[in-house]
Image: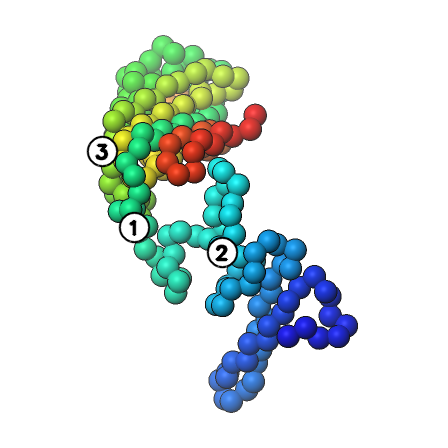
Amino acid sequence: MRQAGWPGDFEIQAVQAEGMGGARRSALKMRDDDAPGPITPGMRRLGSKDRARPAGRTSQRLTHLDDKGAARMVDVADKLATVREAVAECVVRMTPETIEAVRAGTAKGDALQVARVAGIMAAKRTPDLIPLCHPLPLSSVAVDFDFVEAGVRVTTRVRVTGQTGVEMEALTAAAVAGLTLIDMTKGVERGVYLEGVRLLEKSGGRSGTWKRKP
């Protein structure tokens, strides 16, 4: 109900609730009037859940929660199987001396090759680590390394023909490859650390292509 003296930019609906001991309490539900689309019954968030979104923009709604807030696996049965790809990265920070040890080979062996295999295995086991991820028949997983200033950059690329994307698989591969590098080098330097685990791009599916801006 709109009341005199209240800001005109919001519609506020008072919801009365019976509290403990018979106390009356109220909660306010607010919606931005400037957002396109009408208010729909049962709306619980800003804006209209039915409004169209620009291509590549994600939903404001957490898709892994149902209407009651319980965790769920997203039903992808109605989606078309398309070629989907995702690229992710992280950086393992270390001193120049540790970088030289990685180049030459650590006491545990070839650090980069062990980290590469770990990243590939992690991508394939992502549903075992991230509870609501779908098991996917991955087509390919690539893990590459570049020596950068004060560290090693890990880049992963994962590809599948399926009904859902492989962003989490690419991110998991990057993170686990980076952690494996830490394990391979911690005997040389205790302060090695991981940073910047992030998605760089994805393609395929209904939302199309997305790339992180430089």
Residue positioned most to the bottom: 22
**Quadrant in which the N terminus appears:** bottom right
Give the Cα separation between the discs numbered 3 and 1: 17 Å
Task: State the SS at label 2.
Answer: loop
Label 2 and label 3: CA atoms lie apart by 32 Å
Residue at 43% across, 34% down: 208
Quadrant occupied by the C terminus: top right
- The outermost residue toward the top is 104
Which quadrant of the structure image shows residue 161? top left
Image point (60%, 65%), residue name: 30
| Residue 22 spot, x, y in % from top left | 51, 89
Q: Position of residue 91 (x, y in %)?
A: 46, 26
Is residue 184 visible in this depiction of the protein?
Answer: no
Residue 103 vertical position relative to residue 175 in the rendered view, above or below = above
How many discs appear?
3
Against 85, residue 105 (above or below) is above
From the image, state whether disc 1 or disc 2 is nearer to you.
2
* Element type where label 3 sits in the image: loop
How dense is the environment of label 1, judged by Cα within 10 Å: few (below 14), some, or many (20 and up)? few
- Viewer-proximal residue among 133 and 34: 34
> Residue 120, which numbered label?
none
- Label 1 sits on a secondary structure element that is loop
Amino acid type of the residue that numbered disc 2 sits on in the rendered structure: Lys
Spatial distance from mark 1 to mark 2, Cα to Cα?
Answer: 19 Å
Report x, y in % for residue 152: 44, 20
- The answer to whether residue 123 is left or right of residue 60 is left
Q: Earlier in the sequence, mark 3 or mark 1?
A: 1
Q: Residue at x 33, y 18 (%)?
A: 112
Disc with the residue nearer the chain's start (1 vs 2): 2
Find residue 137 and name its label.
Answer: 3
Residue located beneath label 1 in the image: 75
Tags 1 and 2 in contact by the CB under 8 Å rule? no
